[in-house]
Image (cartoon, rainbow, N blue to C red):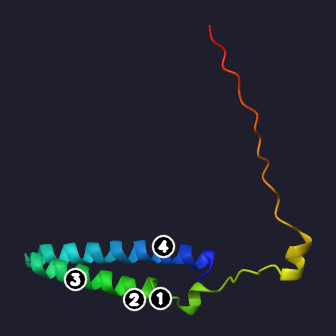
Amino acid sequence: MDWQGQKLAEQLMQILLLAFAVVAFATGYALGSFQKMMLIYASGVVITTLVTVPNWPFFNRHPLKWLDPSEAEKHPKPQTANSSVKKKISKK
């Protein structure tokens, strides 16, 4: 899953969970049944999981281009500078 695919999965999850919550609440309120409300919402969570968790092809529309190993050797990673400069503490 690429970066845009992760963003899409997150947006789909939020939209689907909100939609199922609204539908579940409205149905439960209209029928006066807490059990029906919870079953509809639980079904929505399962459907949302099946849509967003697997690595579906539409989540891989923007693949990353990796650097070739030979090209990576030409450009080594920058070294971090370890400064051992200590600050002086002045006593008054």
Confirm or deny contact between disc 2 and disc 1 (CB under 8 A): yes
Query: Picture coordinates of residue 50 (x, y %)?
Result: 39, 88
Q: Nearer the viewer, residue 85 or 68?
A: 85
The image quadrant of residue 15 is bottom left
Q: CA distance from mark 3 to mark 2?
A: 15 Å
Q: CA distance from mark 4 to mark 2?
A: 14 Å
Circle 3: element type: helix
Left or right: 35 with respect to 25? Answer: left
Circle 1: element type: loop
User: Which label belongs to residue 33?
Assistant: none
Dot placed on the residue nearer the N-terminal end, 4 or 2: 4
Q: Which residue is mark 4?
A: 11
Dot placed on the residue nearer the N-terminal end, 3 or 2: 3
Name the residue rendered at 81%, 79% in the picture: 67
Please rate how many residues cluster around mark 3, counting C-alpha atoms within 10 Å: few if below 14, some from 14 to 19, many from 20.
some
Q: Residue furthest left?
A: 32
